[in-house]
């Protein structure tokens, strides 16, 4: 069996029956959606998803800054912009 990265799991059939109840019962935690007892998707609370996307964007910007750290600098004034 594959590793689940959620404390709660639900079959796709259960999710189809009453998605609102599943979301409410998850209590703001991620839910693994299983198809034939294997994780097929994760149902993630909106706030957690937004935080994840922000974190990924921050990591991408940090990587870009590290890559550019050794580049030659060009001085300009704000008026030149």
Image (cartoon, rainbow, N blue to C red):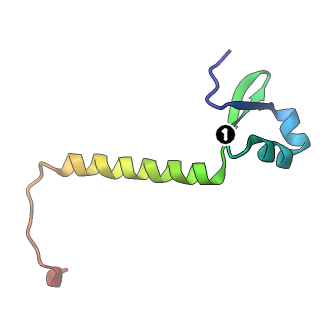
| Left-right relation of 72 to 21 | left
Looking at the image, which residue is at 84% across and 46% down? Answer: 19
Looking at the image, which residue is at 60% across and 54% down? Answer: 47
Mark 1 crowdedness (10 Å alpha carbons): few <14, some 14-19, many ≥20: some
| Left-right relation of 55 to 81 | right
Locate residue 14, reporting x and y percent: 87, 35
Question: Looking at the rendering, in which quadrant would you find the C terminus?
Answer: bottom left
Looking at the image, which residue is at 67% across and 41% down? Answer: 29
Residue designated by label 1: 30
Question: Looking at the rendering, in which quadrant would you find the N terminus?
Answer: top right
Looking at the image, which residue is at 89% across and 44% down? Answer: 18
| Kind of element beneath mark 1 | loop
Q: In this view, does 28 lie above or below 6?
A: below
Q: Residue furthest bottom?
A: 79
Give the image quarter of residue 30. Answer: top right
Locate residue 59, reporting x and y percent: 37, 47
| Left-right relation of 79 to 2 | left
Q: Residue furthest right?
A: 17
Marker count (numbered): 1
Q: Which residue lies furthest to the front in this view?
A: 27
| Left-right relation of 27 to 62 | right
Towards the viewer: 8 or 14: 8
């Amino acid at each position: 069996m594959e590793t689940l990265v959620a404390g709660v799991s639900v079959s796709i059939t259960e999710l189809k029956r009453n998605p609102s109840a599943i979301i409410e019962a998850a209590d703001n935690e991620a839910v693994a959606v299983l198809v034939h007892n294997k994780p097929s998707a994760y149902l993630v609370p909106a706030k957690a998803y937004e935080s994840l996307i922000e974190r990924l964007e921050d990591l991408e910007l940090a990587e870009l800054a590290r890559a550019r750290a050794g580049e030659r600098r060009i001085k300009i004034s704000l008026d030149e912009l």
